Image (tube, rainbow, N blue to C red):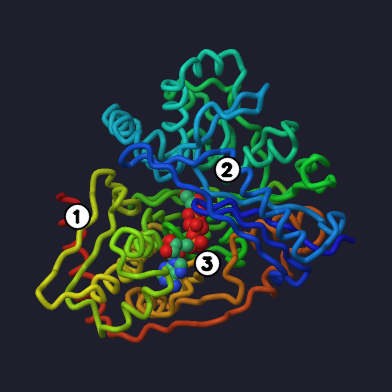
Amino acid sequence: MSKYILAFDQGTTSSRAIVFDPQGNLLSIAQKEFPQIFPQPSWVEHDPDEIWSSQIGVAHEVLARIGIHKSDIAAIGITNQRETTLVWNRQTGKPIYNAIVWQDRRTAKKCEQLKAQGYEATFQSKTGLVIDAYFSATKLQWLLDNVPNAREQAERGELAFGTIDSWLIWKLTEGELHITDVTNASRTLLFNIHTQQWDDELLSIFNIPHSLLPEVRSCSEVYGYTSSNILGSRIPIAGIAGDQQAATFGQAALERGMAKNTYGTGCFMLLNTGDEPIPSHHKLLTTIAWQINGHTDYALEGSVFIAGAVVQWLRDGLGIIKHSADVESLAGSVPDNGGVYFVPAFVGLGAPYWDSYARGTITGLTRGSTSAHIARAALESIAYQTADVLDAMRTDSHLDISELRVDGGASRNDLLMQFQADILGVPVVRPKITETTALGAAYLAGLAVGYWDSSEIVQQWQVEKRFEPTISAEHRATLRDSWRQAIELTQAW
Ligand SMILES: Nc1ncnc2c1ncn2[C@@H]1O[C@H](COP(=O)(O)OP(=O)(O)O)[C@@H](O)[C@H]1O
Ligand SMILES: O=P(O)(O)OC[C@H](O)CO
């Protein structure tokens, strides 16, 4: 039997390739950042060729680094930034335009029109989603309506639409496979999460031809093999999941009532709701967690658009820190936020507010406020946004969330994690392997080829650090009240 699983984690700011061994240990990782393209305020694009070249580049790098032979790879699992939308020509394989990234707000007005036309209930009942520019459908419609000749070509069946998983698999198989999985499909606003099929009514609302769409598959099966021209060997591609679903799997949150939060560019909390797709009354998303061996599990999700990105802004926008990790010592140099609240609504607010037009605010400034207070308020904003989502999750699901498993770049920050536990009143648990997104994709691929079984996945998950809540309920309530006022100011902007 081959000895390793290779995971591709194609994220918003970087591509990673990671090799895991049978014990779920991370043997080696290669990572490459790629450029973010901001053609206009609130537009965010990626060059699909840079996505591909960075992803395949790190795959070669990680294999070369540990000197393993391709035949030692049992399978490849793929996980990706979700919703990001691209269209390419089936004949030439060339993208017709840049990928429009999940953060891009160019279609916010279109979404307002759809809401005014009374479509919200239809979309929520069929897709589990709210109508928002975040999801793929309006981005795809924008491409068809704005790229010269795109609609005509689409109607002639010459174009292919995909999220990033589809694009990577198309490239890995040199155009043999045009597929996606149920988790990525469930983020498009075009996929019915109950029938688990593309929905004709929704397609017609956006005027999207069926011929553009990838075939939808489960999260764990052998879909096909990499072309030997690409990695020098035909390796099974055996797992696909959107990155937040993959992280939930990698956190072994496999039972109903288990929740994880990933602190990356944004923050994404998923609560496993088992085989029940629970509709939300607080603007959370009902989404597919995974489908394995014909069985589908669902999740409630709260998507927060700006989390670690606020730290990047402190670094690149304000210049008050040199490296992201420096935020911890700067914020820790003051005992508290000094009354400063920072709502980083740089691209509007996601769950549970969904306000495209809110913009960032820093409130409560006095003559005594320093860069340390702003840094602290920025970190705290990540925890407050998470707390808003967790409250909504509890109310919607009636499930007791007894701990929060955490991962992602900003989860390395102990100050933030302790404040998170304090403000939630729930223990926060960080596992030994925080590359849970890639690990989840590896597990999904490994399950499909008999490399692991699900009991091993649960056994392999191990705690690195547990943060217990330390503040009183009264203190928590006072802090949350001030945050709520700051949110109101932000929304009034
Ligand atoms: N020690 C830290 N404290 C707070 N934020 C951090 C820290 N280290 C990294 N980050 C933030 O985490 C994010 C990167 O996390 P990552 O999981 O790689 O994100 P993504 O997958 O979205 O690209 C960046 O936004 C960065 O600013
Ligand atoms: O690439 P990440 O980790 O920022 O995740 C992006 C999400 O999938 C967007 O929904």
Binning the other alpha carbons within 10 Å of mark 3 as few (below 14), some (14 to 19) or many (20 upward) gives: many
Earlier-in-chain disc, 1 versus 3: 3
Residue named by callout 1:
490
Residue located beneath label 3 in the image: 258
SS at badge 1: helix
Q: Viewer-proximal residue, 412 or 391? A: 412
Q: Quadrant of residue 324?
A: bottom left
Question: Callout 2, which amino acid?
Answer: Glu
Residue denoted by label 2: 50
Select label 2 or label 1 by which is in front: 2
Question: Considering depth in this image, is 47 or 193 the residue closer to the camera?
Answer: 47
User: Percent from the top left, x then y, of residue 2?
Assistant: 86, 60
Q: Residue at x 13, y 69 (%)?
A: 365
Badge 1 amino acid: Thr
- How many residues crowd mark 2 within 10 Å: few (<14), some (14–19), many (20+)? some
Where is 54 relative to 329, above or below? above
User: Residue shown at 24%/81% (left/top)?
Assistant: 336
The answer to which of marks 2 and 1 sits earlier in the sequence is: 2
Q: Classify mark 2: helix, strand or loop.
A: helix
Q: CA distance from mark 2 to mark 1?
A: 35 Å
Name the side, left or right, on which 29 lies relative to 271.
Answer: right
Relative to 176, does residue 259 appear above or below in the rendering?
Answer: below
Q: Closer to the camera: disc 1 or disc 3?
A: 1
Which residue occupies the extreme right position in the image?
A: 1
On the image, the x and y values in percent for residue 225 come to 80, 42
**Residue at (81%, 64%) from the top-left corner?**
67
Residue 429 visible? The answer is yes
